[in-house]
Image (cartoon, coloured by chain):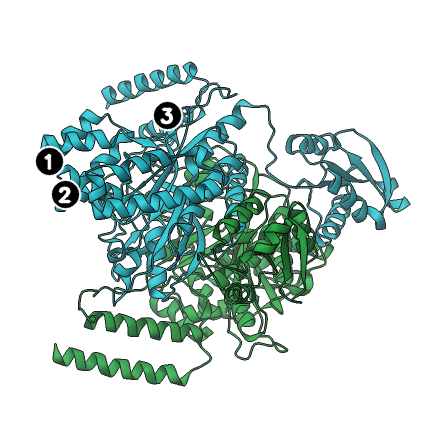
Chain colours: A cyan, B green
Amino acid sequence: MAAEEAAAVREQAEAVRRLKQDKAEPERIAKEVAKLLEMKAQLGGDEGKHKFVLKTPKGTRDYSPKQMAIRERVFSAIINCFKRHGAEVIDTPVFELKETLTGKYGEDSKLIYDLKDQGGELLSLRYDLTVPFARYLAMNKITNIKRYHIAKVYRRDNPAMTRGRYREFYQCDFDIAGQFDPMIPDAECLKIVHEILSDLQLGDFLIKVNDRRILDGMFAVCGVPDSKFRTICSSVDKLDKVPWEDVKNEMVGEKGLSPEAADRIGEYVQLHGGLDLIEQLLQDPKLSQNKLAKEGLGDMKLLFEYLTLFGITGKISFDLSLARGLDYYTGVIYEAVLLQQQNDHVEDPVSVGSVAGGGRYDGLVGMFDPKGRKVPCVGVSIGIERIFSILEQRVEASEEKIRTTETQVLVASAQKKLLEERLKLISELWDAGIKAEILYKKNPKLLNQLQYCEDTGIPLVAIVGEQELKDGVVKLRVVATREEVNIRRENLIEEIRMRTSQL
Amino acid sequence: MAAEEAAAVREQAEAVRRLKQDKAEPERIAKEVAKLLEMKAQLGGDEGKHKFVLKTPKGTRDYSPKQMAIRERVFSAIINCFKRHGAEVIDTPVFELKETLTGKYGEDSKLIYDLKDQGGELLSLRYDLTVPFARYLAMNKITNIKRYHIAKVYRRDNPAMTRGRYREFYQCDFDIAGQFDPMIPDAECLKIVHEILSDLQLGDFLIKVNDRRILDGMFAVCGVPDSKFRTICSSVDKLDKVPWEDVKNEMVGEKGLSPEAADRIGEYVQLHGGLDLIEQLLQDPKLSQNKLAKEGLGDMKLLFEYLTLFGITGKISFDLSLARGLDYYTGVIYEAVLLQQQNDHVEDPVSVGSVAGGGRYDGLVGMFDPKGRKVPCVGVSIGIERIFSILEQRVEASEEKIRTTETQVLVASAQKKLLEERLKLISELWDAGIKAEILYKKNPKLLNQLQYCEDTGIPLVAIVGEQELKDGVVKLRVVATREEVNIRRENLIEEIRMRTSQL
């Protein structure tokens, strides 16, 4: 135990040293502090009775009021966009029957959180919002809906939390379900990603687009056996994180593909471009002979025509290396990435990857329907955690002071023994819809009350004193200018409304 | 299998019979339908390949767009109130370390959902928002905060869903943490309950108030041994659901209390009233000799003085039978119940119980602090599921048409081959912040486009036709009046803004 303690003390000292080093990494500091607290708790407190670890579960975090204020801004921009495009909103439970999730996620299924069998149904936490949406459509026999859904999803990953990746994280999903003319809903999904990323002013971004049919056609003409399409697709999906050589080794070594087939794939996945590339591939002697690839390329061409009408092709790249991990896509797929920013105020820019992704999944609803009836769907999911990380760092680096309450007025007193008068006045204000606070003390000092307004950004103080009570007035003080004016009690509510609507 | 099938068929017939009987219970019908679907799925579909059950987990439900619209109204009223009282907002993960929840809920702990041990930490879904809040305060060494938190919590109960009780349900919590002068924050919590229930117009309500110290003092003077305070308190808590005789039997039979002590408790728990009852009990020869009871009664008197200043004592009842189930309360406790409504438009009023509850818990944060440092807290939790059930029934019964989107204008075409023009125009509208939709068809009929507006409540239609394109105008149609007017293209956005701000 002595050796263990000594080791822990050394580790503490090391952690403190690290803490001093890097001032620019609040998240890492928070982690170090949590580690210190954990070690302290394990060593035992003073009374040795609180030995548990005081932390949130691995891969999760709390949101403080300041972080919530930033989060609300992001949500508001996203929800505004979804509503601008006429979406309804739904909600589903945080867990589903385990079998609802089975067979939908391919190799990623191992990351699903299961609930303990405590008798009754076997349950799992939702892994995304798409499968619950498909279950909802099939269960309610809905064949036509445009909806959004913003909620937390759960993946037992080993996330790099400094890069805004977590085990519990929000997804903001917009999907269009129904049998429609080709590529019109698909184009709208891309327009939505473009609008949201522009609106949030996250710097330059690129939306990569591909089509599962083009990928499958490409696999076929490269000599991949049908049975290996999905697993080779998974390998291609890793290209944004590891170099081609590693991906090739996985294809050949682990997945038993011939080196020649892999090399042929290697040439295709280097290609990216716009309408010109689509035209070129439509002329490709091999691809143009493949029915699936031809269909996919034809639709891709139509998609680019619509995106041209929307004026957004400048940030869209048809990219043959884009594969997406999930099994259920059947047509167009896309993924938005933020590009490294140059003229940025953030000292230490986070390197972020994908911030949005999605695609067409025409078979998923049919997997839930007793008769296998299909409902074609296309959708997009915005991942706010990475976006949030960037905005949070930006706020930290700037001088911007974020208010975490909306209080308009503090009801204060200048002398002692006026608690009752403060309570009567604040009650009137609340009933009139004014956002008001008091300090929870019988006899607070005026200075402390004014300081509270400075600290929390409350713009006005309504001061009751003995003289004011006699005169039937309240002294209204503007915190910023220190201006004070007596307002007749019956006019106070109107005066506060008027003054705070101008702020 | 044949016998099983026959039984299933009989059960189906029985379910159909029950379905026909009760037309007034949509939720029960939904359950029966789910049961039928489940049986059908178990018997196998046409191809016998989709054998899984298509449902949400027991005790949970989806929210449809219409239900979401009602839910948003309720949330908005609650959040407005919390903000009016100057609260910040926080968020915590949906699960906590299992040990964080251990020892906080007394007899209710058996209802906690655990996650499966998949390696790593042992986790449980949160049971309420209070324990995560206390963990958050201790972990971040926060000694002073007024915050709200709206999120889902999880209890493995056997809920009566027709009465708005679920295993997954929202809690809307407002809490004040910090060392303050007595009963000022406590009174504000009751004011908040009063404001929210008044604002939501749910009919008459009553807020019952008691104090754990008064209860403990009462148990002491009735002859309950100290070690049985909490378990006897649990029994008293059942008084709102079962008659006194059953509670007494539990106390005496299961919990080993003497019949005499139980009878003495039985007399006290009949009492309820206002300031007069507090005064009477302060004179009670036994209670007034008990230190805890005296403290509690003194604070109760102060509380009623503050509630009088707030003008809300009319709906507050000091009630000695109120106990609250949870272990962590240390002072004032309260619970709001809706009273049976008389002049109500709902044909079959739901019988609802508690819609809000809370109290003071001065010891909970200390349980998490390594040094046991206490942070006094008081708070209230609004349970929206029951409120939501009532409002949903009210909407069903009324003729009110609820819009589930906010779309201002449908971009339509009068002739064929105008998809490109529609896409160009709607893109301009979206970029200007106008909420706009198109039908996802190349050549939709004008009648279908107008019908879509009728169905979804879209007030305006912007119609492009060949003549309009030549003239540089768009035909703007008001759906309600069928009025049509040509607007110059460059003025269209301004015109739509003007017309929809008036609606």
Q: Is residue A291 above or below residue A134?
A: above
Label 3: which secondary element: helix
Q: Which residue is mark 2?
A: A228
Q: Between residue B245 and residue B141, name the one nearer to us.
A: B141
Determine if residue A319 is in view: no
Q: Earlier in the sequence, mark 3 or mark 2?
A: 3
Label 1: which secondary element: loop
> Pointer 1 indicates a residue of which chain?
A
Question: In the picture, residue B232 is in which quadrant?
Answer: bottom left
> Pointer 3 indicates a residue of which chain?
A
Q: Are marks 1 and 2 in contact (CB under 8 Å)?
A: yes
- Amino acid type, residue under disc 3 in the picture: Leu
For the C terminus of chain A, the quadrant is: top right
- Amino acid type, residue under disc 1 in the picture: Leu
- Amino acid type, residue under disc 2 in the picture: Lys
Q: Earlier in the sequence, mark 1 or mark 3?
A: 3
Q: Do the residues marked 3 and 2 share a common chain? A: yes
- The CA span between labels 3 and 2 is 48 Å
Find residue B31 and report its horizontal and vertical position in percent. Answer: 36, 72
